[in-house]
Image: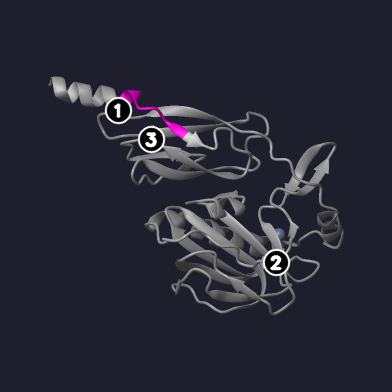
């Protein structure tokens, strides 16, 4: 009995920590909780390996509270513990191009709204399934193109100082037909021609992580394909709601979009 009690007490007093300590909105964090088996952040389950798990802080959900709750569970007997992650505002430029794109757009009719809903469901389903695979990558993530960044993550439109829409990815320059490389090893989860994203490829990397590639002129992979890091999965295009050819590269932890640049720092 004594040793069991001590074991439980030790688990209770284990510190939960995370890096970075005060993450910006829309970022990937690494949670450390030795011995933990599961937990959740922003409604997304965590996958612990060797006492560490990835999680993501939402871009928009923390505007008022600036805190994200992190719950950790060890096992049935030692149920869990909550920690509160302080979140700092993400500073990003107000992007005039977003305004221009919006002026060109008539209000959607009911058929278009139905299409947008259907596509949101497909993407939501792919995001949920990202949790079903074990970690598939072994080497660091790479940029899908080494070209110039034309729009950073989190930029967008403000009205009276309040963000109205924010860019949930990173735009990389490229002429139509230029190669798009998958940023790490994974399995193709979804390929389609979407109203906003145009021809798009979604790749599961396991442990909740998914990367997305929008506005392609062509997709060169199919659902279920295993892709190796750096493999060409499509060609740059201008499909979907865009003003010119470029690659929109996105990253998600489950349904939570975060800055894909954070993936490049993972070791
Ligand atoms: Zn974009």
Above or below residue 154? Residue 142 is below
Q: Is residue 79 magenta?
A: no
Q: Residues within 10 Å of mark 2 (few under 14, many from 20)?
A: few
Which disc number belongs to residue 147? 2
Secondary element type, mark 3: loop
Return the residue nearer the eye: 75 or 249: 249
Q: Residue 131 in the image: state x and y as whole percent.
A: 42, 53
76 sits left or right of 1 in the view: right
Q: Earlier in the sequence, mark 3 or mark 1?
A: 1
Cα gap from disc 1 to disc 2, whole angstroms: 47 Å
Q: Residue 134 in the image: state x and y as whole percent.
A: 37, 57
Q: Quadrant of the N terminus?
A: top left
The residue mark sitting in front, 2 or 3, is 2
Residue beneath the point at 62% across and 72% down: 180
Q: Are marks 3 and 1 in contact (CB under 8 Å)?
A: no
Q: Residue 81 in the image: state x and y as whole percent.
A: 39, 27
Cα gap from disc 2 to disc 3, whole angstroms: 38 Å
The residue mark sitting in front, 1 or 2, is 2
Q: Tell me the residue that label 3 is attached to.
A: 33
Q: Tell me the residue that label 1 is attached to.
A: 11
Secondary element type, mark 1: helix
Ligand 1, image quadrant it occupies: bottom right
Residues shaded magenta: 11-17
Above or below residue 8? Residue 154 is below
Q: Residue 108 in the image: state x and y as whole percent.
A: 76, 61
78 sits left or right of 216 in the view: left
């Amino acid at each position: 009995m004594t040793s069991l009690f001590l074991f439980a007490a030790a688990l209770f007093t284990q510190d939960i920590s995370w890096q970075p300590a005060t993450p910006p909105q829309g970022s990937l964090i690494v949670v450390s909780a030795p011995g933990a088996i599961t937990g959740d952040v922003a409604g997304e389950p965590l996958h612990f390996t060797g006492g560490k798990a990835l999680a993501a802080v939402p871009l928009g959900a923390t505007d008022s509270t600036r805190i994200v709750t992190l719950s950790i569970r060890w096992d049935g007997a030692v149920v869990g513990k909550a920690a509160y992650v302080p979140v700092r505002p993400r500073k990003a430029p107000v992007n005039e191009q977003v305004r221009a794109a919006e002026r060109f757009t008539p209000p959607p009719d009911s058929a278009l709204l139905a299409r947008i809903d259907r596509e949101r469901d497909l993407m939501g389903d792919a995001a949920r399934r990202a949790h079903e695979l074990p970690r598939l990558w072994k080497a660091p993530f790479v940029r899908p193109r080494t070209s110039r960044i034309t729009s950073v993550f989190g930029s967008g439109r403000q009205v009276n100082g309040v963000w109205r829409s924010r860019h949930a990815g990173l735009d990389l320059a490229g002429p139509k037909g230029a190669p798009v490389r998958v940023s790490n090893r994974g399995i193709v989860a979804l390929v389609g021609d979407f109203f906003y994203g145009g021809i798009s490829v979604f790749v599961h990397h396991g442990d909740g992580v998914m990367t997305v590639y929008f506005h392609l002129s062509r997709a060169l992979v199919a659902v279920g394909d295993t892709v190796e890091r750096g493999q060409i999965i499509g060609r740059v295009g201008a499909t979907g709601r865009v003003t010119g050819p470029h690659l929109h590269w996105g990253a998600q932890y489950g349904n939570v979009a975060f800055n894909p640049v954070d993936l490049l720092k993972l070791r």
